[in-house]
């Protein structure tokens, strides 16, 4: 008890800050790997560590030697196996507000127009039960995905989006990628989600929407061709049966949030430039 009391008495501000930083880092790592294959791999590593220590204590020399060698080789294997999660983590760090720029460079009236065009298109496709998948690029670039499709680079309009997804047309199969007020490409291929807990009722479009939002900060909108229901995916989570008004509110929050972020960033940069001048 005295030993524990001494520890608490000797804790300073730096120690508290240090503990907070480590705790926050572990929390962020957990949120990144939660409900992914990495979570199961971490559990397997913990079991191996416990088994290695137990074999050492029990003096099971052969078993201990095998486990130690496995752990040594496993470090290299982990870098390969966890490559998607490591990339996702580095992208998350790169999206911090001090290191990134906003994806919004259009005026408020144009933002409102873009939102109306997207919602009108989704409403029409939903009524007609035409399957659709639209991805809104934000801070994380999606050029790798854009390159898998057909370049369009046209202004966002409900007519363009509806025509793209009309069945049996050249570009209807795949995703449309939108950046700011422009349709960058159509018929793009998206990575499917690796989440094993996804509802079995969900089709390829929904899995692709979840997959791309697991690997970037984009927003994905899905229209089911079976039911016409609209779903929205963000950060690896899916909201189903979204009505048009809710979709409009979601898009407004995203565009306005990024617009405000850009304004604050520009203000900070101008202040810094004036200070240097």
Image (cartoon, rainbow, N blue to C red):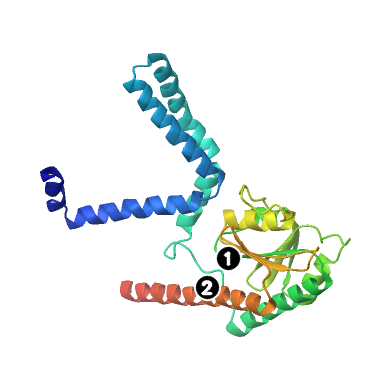
Up the image or down, 51 lies above or below 207; here it is: above
Q: Residue furthest top?
A: 62
Residue 241 is situated, as x and y percent measured from the top left of the image, at 68, 69
Name the residue located 48 percent from the left edge and 56 percent from the top edge: 92
Looking at the rendered image, the quarter that the N terminus falls into is top left
Residue 23 is situated, as x and y percent measured from the top left of the image, at 34, 52
Up the image or down, 175 lies above or below 90; here it is: below
Name the residue located 58 percent from the left edge and 81 percent from the top edge: 107
Q: Which sits in the foreground, 131 or 86?
A: 131
| Secondary structure type for disc 1 | loop
Looking at the rendered image, the quarter that the C terminus falls into is bottom left
- Residue 138, quarter of picture: bottom right
Q: For the residues marked 2 and 1, what is the alpha-carbon distance in whole angstroms?
A: 8 Å
Q: Earlier in the sequence, mark 2 or mark 1?
A: 1
Q: Which residue is mark 1?
A: 138
CA neighbours of label 2 inside 10 A, class few (<14), some (14 to 19), many (20+): some
Residue 258, numbered label: 2
Name the residue located 49 percent from the left edge and 77 percent from the top edge: 260
| Secondary structure type for disc 2 | helix
Residue 42 is situated, as x and y percent measured from the top left of the image, at 47, 40
Q: Residue furthest front?
A: 1
State left or right for residue 26 relative to residue 161.
left
State left or right for residue 40 relative to residue 14.
right
- Residue 109, quarter of picture: bottom right
């Amino acid at each position: 008890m005295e030993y524990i009391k001494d520890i608490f008495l000797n804790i300073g501000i730096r120690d508290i800050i240090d503990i907070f930083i480590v705790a926050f880092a572990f929390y962020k790592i957990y949120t990144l790997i939660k409900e992914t294959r990495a979570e199961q791999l971490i559990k397997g590593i913990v079991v191996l560590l416990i088994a290695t220590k137990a074999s050492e204590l029990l003096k099971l020399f052969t078993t201990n030697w095998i486990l130690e060698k496995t752990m040594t080789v496993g470090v290299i294997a982990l870098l390969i196996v966890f490559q998607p999660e490591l990339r996702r983590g580095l992208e998350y760090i790169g999206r911090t507000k001090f290191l990134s720029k906003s994806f919004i460079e259009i005026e408020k009236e144009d933002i409102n127009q873009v939102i109306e065009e997207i919602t009108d298109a989704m409403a029409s496709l939903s009524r007609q039960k035409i399957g659709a998948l639209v991805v809104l690029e934000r801070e994380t670039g999606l050029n790798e995905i854009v390159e898998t499709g057909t370049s369009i680079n046209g202004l966002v309009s409900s007519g363009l989006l509806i025509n793209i997804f009309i069945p049996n047309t050249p570009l209807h199969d795949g995703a449309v990628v939108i950046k700011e007020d422009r349709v960058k490409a159509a018929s793009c291929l998206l990575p499917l989600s690796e989440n094993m807990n996804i509802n079995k009722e969900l089709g390829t479009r929904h899995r692709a929407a979840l997959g791309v939002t697991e690997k970037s900060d984009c927003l994905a909108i899905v229209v089911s061709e079976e039911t016409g229901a609209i779903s929205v995916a963000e950060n690896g989570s899916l909201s189903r049966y979204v009505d048009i008004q809710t979709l409009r509110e979601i898009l407004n929050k995203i565009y306005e949030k990024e617009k405000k972020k850009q304004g604050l960033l520009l203000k900070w940069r101008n202040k810094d430039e004036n200070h240097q001048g």
